[in-house]
Image (cartoon, rainbow, N blue to C red):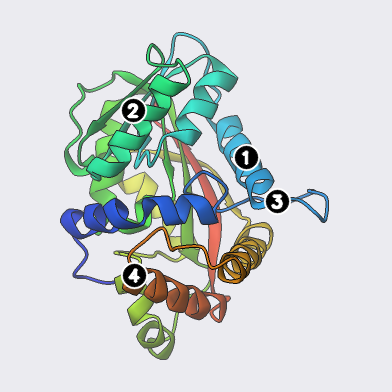
Amino acid sequence: MLRGDHAVTAATVAEYYNQATELISADLGGSLHFGYWHGLPENSSMQDASRQMTELMISKLSVGPGQRVLDVGCGAGRPAADLSRATGASVVGVDISPRQIELATGLARTEGMEDKLSFQLADVMSLPFEADTLDAAWLFESMFHMPDQSRVLEEIARVLRPGGRVAIANLVQRVPLTEEQNAALEEYWKVGNVAALLPLEDYPKLLSDSGLVLTELADISEDTTGPTFEAIGRTHAARAVGHTESLAPGELASQMGAGMDQFIATPEIGFAIIVASKPG
């Protein structure tokens, strides 16, 4: 069963990231995604775990020089830059937040990667690309913001070349949430613009119905959510001691913190890597 806030729209998600991108990036080690802590030394940083998550996702795409990868919900551009640098592939990123496109474009320019990276305002529900023109795609913690996830995957399947791969890193319901749990999380859904959270077991059918073939479905919650929130907590504590000014409007920062606390108290929400391909 889908969980989330049915009032989420592209406009509300864009405004959320226009305001909160710098805060989220600071919390998450420079990228806007959870860390992958598997096998890391005990004193590893959020940045170390964030980098390892990006490396894990890169490994799922199997792309190389001369190929083009679609980054759906590209954020501030760091994973796209790491992907291109590691593989030689070009990356085209789309996002609905003008602030994130501005930051990602600035990153490409600063790192001298404008020949490999491009970013544009676009909605994944209607991608501005011809059919069968991209070699791979990834959705790095962007899919839960999208109410109609079937439509999202259908669009990705349309633009991928036959044999192209898609990798998804996403929050999931490890087991279906009760009505009481969903009610308790209502404020988190709203503040975080979580439009739809699926049970892990729903993905095979969702992908099949969208024209994609599932190749991997891995619950990596134990190495992601808990350790990441512990790291964020340490960052917040250090920020409070240093009396550092918040990187987001005060009310939003407070709401995000409260939502995080509720998330931590709900271990039924986890994290998964899903990999699929377009038949070819």
* Residue 247 in sight: yes
Circle nearer the N terminus (1, 3): 3
Per the image, the residue denoted by label 3 is 45
Q: Nearer the viewer, residue 59 or 9?
A: 9
* Rendering coords of residue 90 (x, y %): 42, 17
The CA distance from mark 4 to mark 3 is 25 Å
Q: Nearer the viewer, residue 263 or 114?
A: 114
Q: Residue at x 36, y 61 (%)?
A: 248
Circle nearer the N terminus (1, 2): 1
Query: Dots 4 and 3: beta carbons under 8 Å?
Result: no
The type of residue carrying mark 4 is Leu
Q: Nearer the viewer, residue 151 or 255?
A: 255
State left or right for residue 180 relative to residue 84.
Answer: left
At label 2, counting other C-alpha atoms closer than 10 Å, the crowd grade (few under 14, some 14-19, many 20 or more) is many
Circle nearer the N terminus (4, 3): 3
Q: Residue at x 40, y 81 (%)?
A: 185
Per the image, the residue denoted by label 4 is 252
Circle nearer the N terminus (4, 1): 1
Tag 1 secondary structure: helix
Circle nearer the N terminus (2, 4): 2
Looking at the image, residue 129 lies above or below residue 97: above
The type of residue carrying mark 1 is Arg
